[in-house]
Each structure stands twice: as structure tokens, then as C-alpha cells.
Image: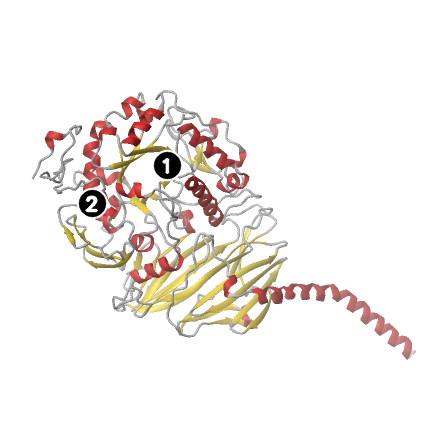
Amino acid sequence: MRSVLVAIIVLLGLSLLLGILPILQATRSDWGLTSEFFSKTTSSQVPISPLMVDRYIAGISGEIAVALNEREGYRLEAVTVGGRRYLTGKDFPTFTVLDSQGKQHSLQVNAPIWQTKLQRNGATIAVLYRANGLVAQVIYIPDRDRLNIVIRVLEEGEWKIVSVSGTLLTRTAGIGDDDYLVDGSGWLVFPDLPKAAERKWVANSDNLIGGATTAGFVAWREKDRIVFLKPLTFSHWLGWSAKPEGARTHFSLRAGLYFRPSETKIFETRLCHKALALRIETAGDLNGDGEVDWVDAGIAYRERYIKPHRHGCLRHRLRDAFRVYHSVHAYPSYEAAFAGLADIDFSDGIWWCKGVMQFAFEEDSESHPFTVKINPKLGNFAPYKEKMTKAGQWTGIYYGHDYITLDAGDWPDEFIKRDPNNKPYRYFAGSGRYRTKFYKDNVRSVATGAVFQHYEQILKTCGLTRGDPIMLDTFSAFAREGYHPDFPATVELEMQAKHRIAEFLHDKGLIVAGEGIVEGLQDVVDFGAYAMHPEWALKERIWIRREGIQRVPMLPVVFQGASYYGAGWYEFRQHAPNWAVGLVYGVGYWDWLPQGPKYAWMRFARYYFNQNLVWAQVADAKVHDIEQKGSQFTITYDNGAMLWVDLETNRWILEKDGVRYDGFTPFNNRGYMAVLVQSDFEIILPGEHQLEISHHQPFRKQIVFE
């Protein structure tokens, strides 16, 4: 009887073992991924966007460590960097997932559904998270004086990953402290602000035309250091908050990494990124001026991550010329559009001509069809282009790259970007004579090669050759996500596609401009025509600290020397434009030509000598330091130049190569200079062996010699 009972127990045990064996094997398989990926994860394998460089610039030395809360799903409790410990918001990592019904859910790791496991390898810690078929790994990697955090997606099932996010750094500052928050667009937030403030943006997807170009970081300043939170991809969101409480203010820095587009609804949408990373790091007094401030934050970011401009192009033509948007379609012929323009001889010129190609609908100058044809009403572009080129007036085209007109009826599907509902993604709603426009799908059209064939046809039809300029409307102003389930586009992938398009045009020898510019394209876009808006900056007087918030010129600190940047032209419509604000922000002004060729001399000489020629002296230099006293800025550059600017009085003084330019300009590449007296559409120029006014100048009699 006993032997029978033992046999039954053995059989039951085997049955139970066989029943749980698949579960054990599955569990071992899942946890086995930890060892497989853990052993391969080193600092050299931290995923970094190909649109960035990763130069090591030493930060503050000291302990690098993380504190995880085992009882709460190994959530991140604190970070030690540069020997200083900072608490988190106790919400990292938060996973946003997509279920099979197309609904997104955000879950912190202390939710009971998660299975977790931790493994250590020296100072590196990996945590595996598993729920509903989703298996992801969060790896904390100390690297010299910085902390890398890598998130890898290992498997997906009933849940698919959209993002991982959280508040990674917090601290409290006293009202009287000199500490402040600082971000990549130049916001400074001080502890004495009267009410709570916060910002959040989706990488370059939220960049605004006319808004200061944003570098991808949030940080705060302490007396001896800058502490950064930096995503190592453009597939991210960033944010900060400042909340006053009595005599203290609580600062926090937040970030999220997108593995799929942010508003993904379609369950079948492919995974865009298998691994993404962010970094917590520090910087000290990098420019050696004896204090740590926001300028050091910009310099640290620039030297660590900003790619220099691509060599081998003719972009110096942009620097040394005036720049103009010319609506040739508004004239009855090219003869009328270019009358007298080849006689301009005080400077080179860059001419972006709108309307060289035929519109889909004549009344809508933004209606670009897929079929490329020359504008039939204007005649033959070639002889006028040739005449302008011989005069050093470089002519090319303006083209609305980012949007298409579906009403034209000929755009292939691969060019039509999809919105979160997989419908054509509307760019703007039509009104009046303008038809509704839709976003172009750069990722799909690059993948198939169709966009390159399209541009080959454009260049051939318009007769563009090496050294000619091309302006792509909103091309580099932002990077919109795309939601085609087979070709989804995060901001990172959209940027990579646009980068490839700009590379293609560079390989053809063209000078590439975009109506706007964002980080990641500065090395291949030669001129970002809309990086800041002078009129708004002056109206708001943003250099003044109000209610604990100040706006500083971060744009030139981070980006000057990498690409050329421009500003909105509306300031030129004023009786007395402010030239100084553009010099502070490191941008070269440009304009439209709405009044006809006769007025080109007056308009172009006015902004060229008052602003462009001065800007050109420092356009290729990096900012070394910026000091501010009220409305006065003193900027020093790595080429030894110094620029003093007063925004209120609209004055500037440039010192370069031992010469002090005060009220007069350097000579340009044609041997021209000017003595400056600003008045209503008039400029006073010197004579006497320095400058003779061309006999072609239609306003010759209005020019006063001294």
C-alpha cells in the first residue's frame, strides 16, 4: 500500500513539475536576456543619435551612483553626480504602453503587474521589467563623471512600448540664492519667481518659426557647476518646473524617450528604436572667466554635442552677401523681375526666387504639384540667371519642401505623411486663395528614393548648378512625427531623413537654406532664415529679468560657428529698425523684395551695411563669453573679436584685428564700406578714395557724402 502511495506522489510531482516547467523555462528565458544584454552594455555602446557628436568634456569630478527602491519596482530614488546627491521625482521609469485596442496607458514600475529583476556588474546596474509580453531593460551606467541611462526593448506582446519618462532630478533653492534653471532656448528661472512655472516640449517637433532655436537640454546652475539632463536622441521630450513654497523654490528636470511617435494609436505600428538613452552630467567654468553661469552651460553643450558645419560647400557666399526672397511670380516676366538687379555692385547677393516652377493653382503660390514644370508666364529663366551670376548675384529657387497640395492630384502616396489616425496629416487648412496643404512624408520618400528623383527633376528643370542657392520653406523649422504603421517617424527618424535630403543637395554643390533651423541639421543647412524674431524680442524686452524669469541669447553660444542663422524680416518694416538685437543673437538679416527692383538698392544697402557686414565678421566664430549690464551686451569670440551692443539705443561697436569699428563698417569682399547714419530708408556712405557710388544707383542723389 505504501509503495502505491509513493508511486502516486511521484506521479503527481512529475505532473506538477511538467506543468510548471514551461513557466520556469519562460522565466529563465526572460531573465536570461538580462545576462545577454548586460554583458554587452558598456559606455561605448550607449546609443547616441548619428546627428550628434559625443565629445568627452570633463565635468565635475566625484562619485557617480544611483539609488533604487527595491520595494517600489526598483524605481530611481536618487542620483549622485559630481559627488553631490539629488533626489528624483520618484516616477522614473514610467512606461507608456499601447494595448491592442489602440489605447495608451502610463504605468510606474511599482504597479503590481510588473515582474522585475536586478543584476549588478561592478557599478553598472540593470533592471529587467516584464508585463503583458513587454520585456524592457533599464541600465544605469556610470561613465567617468557622468551617468548614462539606457533603455532597451527586448520583446513586445500584448503591450507595445511608446515611451519611458520621469522626473530625474530635483532640488530646492532659497529665494536669495543665485541658482537658476536654464534650458536650451535660453530661459533662466530664478528662485524668486512669484508663482509656479513649467515648460515641456517634444524635441524639435515643437520648434516655432521665429522662436529661438532650442538646444536639447534642461539644466540648473549651482555656484560651482551646471547640472544637465540630456537625451542622447532627438526622439524625446524635455521639461522643467519651478514651484515656489515660502522662502524656497523647488526645481525639477524631466525627460521622456519615444520609441514610437508620441500619439501612436495603431497597434501594428512598427517599433522605431530598440534602444535609447539619456545622460546626467555636469560642467564647470569652461570659459575661465571665474564664474559658472549660463554661458558655460551653452559652451559645454556645444563642445560635447554640436556637429561642425560640413566642409566643401560654397556657403561663404551666404555670409558675404545680402540675402533676399524674390517673388518673381508676381511680375509679368523675368525681364521685369530682374530689371536693373545685375547692376548692383556694392555687394554680392543671394536671391531665392519663388515661382520659377509652375504652381498647381496659379492663384496659390504655395501649391506645389509633384510634376515639375517651368512657370510658363515668365519666359526663359536661363539668360537672366546667367547675367546675374556674372555680376556676383547668385540666383536659385524657393521651394515649399515640407508641404504638398493633394488637390493637385499627382502626389504619389509615399510622399503623403500620415497623422495618428493614418489619414493625410494636415499642414494647414486652406482659406481664401490658398488650398489646404499636407505634410510631406520625408521618411517614406527617402526610404524609396523617390524624393531624390523628385529633386533631380527640380534641379534639371530650374537649371540649378554648383554654387546656386536653394531655400526650402520650413524644411529645418521643425520635425513632425509621422504615423504610417510601416514607416513611423519619431522626431529622430524625421531629422535623419531631412539630413539625408540636405546631404543630397550639398553633394550637388547647392547652398542650402531653410526657413528656420533646428539642432541636428546645423551641419548641412547653411542658413536658417528664421532662427529668431527681432520684433518680438524688442517688444517684450526679453533681456530684462521679470518675476524671476529672464531670456538670454543661448542661440549664438550653442550654434554660432556651426551654421549661419537669420531672423524674421518684419523688423525692417519699422521706421528705424533695431540692428543691434540681431548682432546679439548672432543672426544675419534678410528681406523680401516687395516693392520692385528699383528699391533693391535702398533696401539692401540699408540692412547690409547696418547689420550684415558687421555680422559677417563674427559669423564663423564661436562665442567665448557674454556679459550683460542691463540692455548692454559685451560678446567675446574665439577669433579674438569683441562686440559691444546696446539694445535700447541700437548701437554697436566691433573690435577686430586691432581696429575699432564705431559708426563705420569694415570693408567687404568687394572693397566697400560705409559710415552709418540711420534715417528713413537712407544710408550715408563715405567717399574720398574708399567708395564710389555706382552710376546705376537709382537713388544716387539721395546719398550724402562725408
Q: From mark 2 to mark 1, how far is it between C-alphas? A: 26 Å
* Residue 396 vertical position relative to residue 543 in the rendered view, above or below: above
Q: Residue furthest left?
A: 706
Tell me the residue that label 2 is attached to: 579
Instruction: Give the quadrant of residue 198.
Output: bottom left
Q: Quadrant of the C terminus?
A: top left
Tell me the residue that label 1 is attached to: 470
Give the residue displayed 50% in from the left and 27% down from the top.
Answer: 409
Q: Quadrant of the N terminus?
A: bottom right
Crowding at label 2, few (<14), some or many (≥20) Cα neighbours within 10 Å? Answer: many
Give the residue displayed 11% in from the left and 39% down from the top.
Answer: 689
Residue 423 appears left or right of 130: left
User: Is label 1 in a helix, a strand or a loop?
Assistant: strand
Residue 63 location (% of width, % of height)? 43, 74
Residue 500 location (% of width, % of height)? 46, 44
| Three-letter amino acid code of the residue under disc 2 | Trp
Q: Residue furthest bottom?
A: 2
